């Protein structure tokens, strides 16, 4: 008799999924396509967008980077919407399929905008008028269609891939960790292609060709993804996660005057004292925890709760311990969520100011002119190398030293990335100070169009460091938020993680605007002006290093406070705290 998957997965017809006929690696790899092409598309646009905005549309050095970071920020903020729609209404599969189609349409608009001569700005060298309203309207339409597509894809495609593995089956659970690592490698492959081949095509063949390739690739990814429809494992939508959270909060508020019982087993829906609290077969979400005790009042029984003996108790008056613990799990995620935002503020500089920084340096390598935007290719190449070394060497070594099945915990992995991000900003500030000094020595401070005689390779260390940091932080966050989110809320959990990227980009835009406003006072030229040689970009990098250092301290406090869903690793008996 065929073995049914034990985690409640369904096949494409809505029947219990058969293990041998659905899911597993053969089906999980099909989800790499939409994510690979999404990364190729988004970065193919964002990485070189700042040069398009300044050189082709003649926008300023303060407005152009903010358009890029706002586009990327909106893309990741919409992941919350994508996760909500999937968990509540249509499931992950259809959310990914529809979102990929929307992103394809966005790239089609951008291809038309950059291909038709009537929509291009006239060639200009000095005192150029900015782009017309029609051009900017089409640009924003294309960018935010693409952003909407990104929001639906990124919040669901990794969770949908992880759904192909049964978390209740030890062998498949181990494969899930490998899936997250290699899923991120697929992201890096798409990013690497966009930062090398696509950037070269945009700069030397035409932007229309570069964006057209992105549109064609996304269309191909949609076809491949849909081809696996009959072979995937599906999770049915579990209803609105916001409603589930609201029920607990409302019930707790209604009973805020009641005293909590000393015996937790008297709470409604408690496992009871006869249940072994460390039984590995028992899900942590059903066990009572002592954090956020005020929410426990939602499970306190009172004489008016006679309806609990009915088959359908009133959910807005009385909640089970499991329902309350789900809300506690979401609340425990929030401090970790808040203290990982600054990493992506650092990351945003690699796609904005570092690109402009590289464009003002010597980019000649023999007869080849190195595209400044391609510097980020080293970031993603570093990610691929780091993930491989981590997976093959670091994890086995740390597993022996710590006894932890993953080598180090996900929170420790995130922490390593935050430390490396600080080092990246220190290096970036040092390199920029050297670049400006060389410009001064060669009397080029007022000649921003003349490359400073300093090789563009000097900025590569900051890209490498951010790449190492992202390999630790991004994958750690992805696995952490998927595993630690309540069952049925994984898409929203992944969306919550991806919103840190969004807020990191928005924080970058905010800091740029504030720094520009504050430093221009009193007749000063400011830290960030159109002439980068007269800017104080190094001071801005130092500011980010300080902000990131303060954030690291807060993160360490939050990580020490956090309790995992399984407070004890049952396979080793060792503590699973940070």
Image (spheres, rainbow, N blue to C red):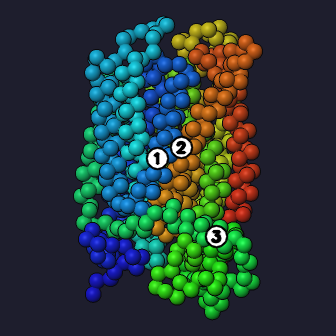
Q: Look at the picture and state if 536 lies above or below 409.
A: above
Tell me residue 280's x, y (percent): 57, 82
Left-right relation of 130 to 399: left
Of residue 63 and residue 392, the one placed in the foreground of this image is 63
On residue 452, which mark appears? Answer: none
Is 110 rendered above or below residue 295? Answer: above
Q: Earlier in the sequence, mark 2 or mark 3?
A: 3
Question: Do the numbered discs 2 and 3 sit on residues whose CB atoms are within 8 Å?
Answer: no
Give SS at disc 3: helix
**Front residue of this view, candidates 423 and 280:** 280
Residue found 45% across the figure and 26% down from its top: 371
Mark 2 residue element: helix
Residue at mark 1: 78
How far is the residue under mark 3 from the one under mark 1?
33 Å
Q: Is residue 412 left or right of residue 378?
A: right
Asked where in the image residue 52 lies, by quadrant, the reply is: top left
Q: Which residue is mark 2?
A: 502
Q: Position of residue 250 (x, y in %)?
A: 59, 67
Label 2 and label 3: CA atoms lie apart by: 35 Å
- What residue sits 42% from the left and 9% below the top? 124
């Amino acid at each position: 008799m065929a073995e049914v998957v034990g985690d409640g997965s369904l096949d494409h017809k809505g029947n219990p999924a058969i293990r041998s006929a659905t899911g597993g690696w053969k089906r999980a790899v099909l989800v790499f396509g939409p994510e690979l092409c999404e990364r190729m598309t988004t970065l193919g646009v964002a990485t070189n967008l700042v040069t398009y905005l300044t050189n082709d549309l003649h926008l300023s050095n303060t407005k152009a980077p903010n358009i890029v970071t706002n586009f990327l920020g909106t893309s990741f903020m919409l992941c919350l919407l994508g996760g909500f729609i999937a968990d509540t209404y249509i499931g992950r599969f259809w959310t990914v399929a529809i979102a990929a189609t929307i992103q394809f349409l966005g790239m089609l608009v951008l291809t038309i905008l950059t291909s038709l001569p009537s929509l291009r700005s006239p060639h200009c060298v000095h005192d150029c008028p900015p782009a017309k309203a029609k051009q900017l309207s089409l640009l924003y339409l294309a960018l935010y269609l693409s952003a909407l597509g990104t929001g639906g894809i990124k919040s669901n495609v990794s969770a949908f891939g992880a759904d192909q593995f049964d978390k209740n089956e030890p062998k498949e659970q181990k494969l899930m960790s490998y899936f997250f690592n290699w899923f991120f490698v697929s992201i890096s492959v798409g990013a690497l292609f966009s930062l090398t081949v696509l950037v070269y095509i945009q700069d030397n063949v035409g932007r229309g060709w570069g964006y057209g390739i992105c549109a064609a690739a996304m269309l191909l990814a949609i076809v491949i993804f849909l081809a696996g429809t009959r072979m995937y494992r599906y999770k049915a939508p579990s209803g609105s996660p916001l409603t589930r959270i609201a029920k607990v909060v409302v019930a707790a508020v209604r009973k805020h005057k009641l005293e909590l019982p000393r015996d937790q087993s008297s709470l409604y829906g408690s496992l009871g004292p006869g249940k072994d609290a460390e039984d590995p077969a028992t899900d942590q979400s059903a066990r009572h925890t002592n954090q956020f005790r005020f929410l426990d009042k939602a499970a306190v029984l009172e004489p008016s709760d006679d309806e609990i003996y009915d088959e359908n108790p009133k959910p807005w008056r009385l909640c089970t311990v499991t329902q309350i613990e789900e809300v506690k799990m979401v609340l425990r995620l929030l401090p970790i969520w808040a203290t990982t935002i600054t990493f992506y503020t650092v990351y945003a500089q690699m796609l904005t100011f570092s690109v402009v920084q590289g464009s003002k340096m010597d980019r000649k390598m023999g007869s080849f002119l190195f595209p400044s935007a391609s510097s980020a290719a080293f970031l993603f190449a570093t990610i691929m190398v780091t993930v491989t070394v981590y997976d093959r060497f670091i994890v086995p070594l740390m597993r022996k030293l710590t006894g932890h099945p993953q080598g180090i915990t996900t929170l420790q992995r995130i922490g390593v990335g935050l430390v490396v991000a600080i080092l990246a900003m220190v290096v970036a500030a040092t390199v920029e100070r050297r670049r400006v000094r060389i410009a001064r020595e060669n009397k080029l401070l007022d000649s921003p169009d003349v490359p400073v005689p300093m090789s563009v390779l000097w900025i590569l260390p900051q890209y490498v460091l951010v790449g190492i940091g992202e390999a630790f932080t991004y994958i750690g966050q992805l696995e952490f938020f998927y595993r630690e989110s309540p069952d049925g809320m994984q898409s929203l959990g992944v969306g919550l993680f991806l919103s840190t990227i969004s807020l990191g980009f928005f924080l970058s835009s905010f800091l740029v605007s504030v720094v520009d406003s504050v430093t221009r006072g009193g007749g000063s030229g400011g830290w960030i002006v159109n002439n980068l040689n007269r800017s104080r970009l190094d001071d801005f990098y130092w500011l980010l290093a300080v902000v990131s250092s303060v954030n690291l301290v807060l993160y360490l406090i939050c990580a020490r406070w956090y309790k995992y869903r399984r407070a004890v690793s049952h396979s080793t008996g060792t503590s699973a705290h940070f």
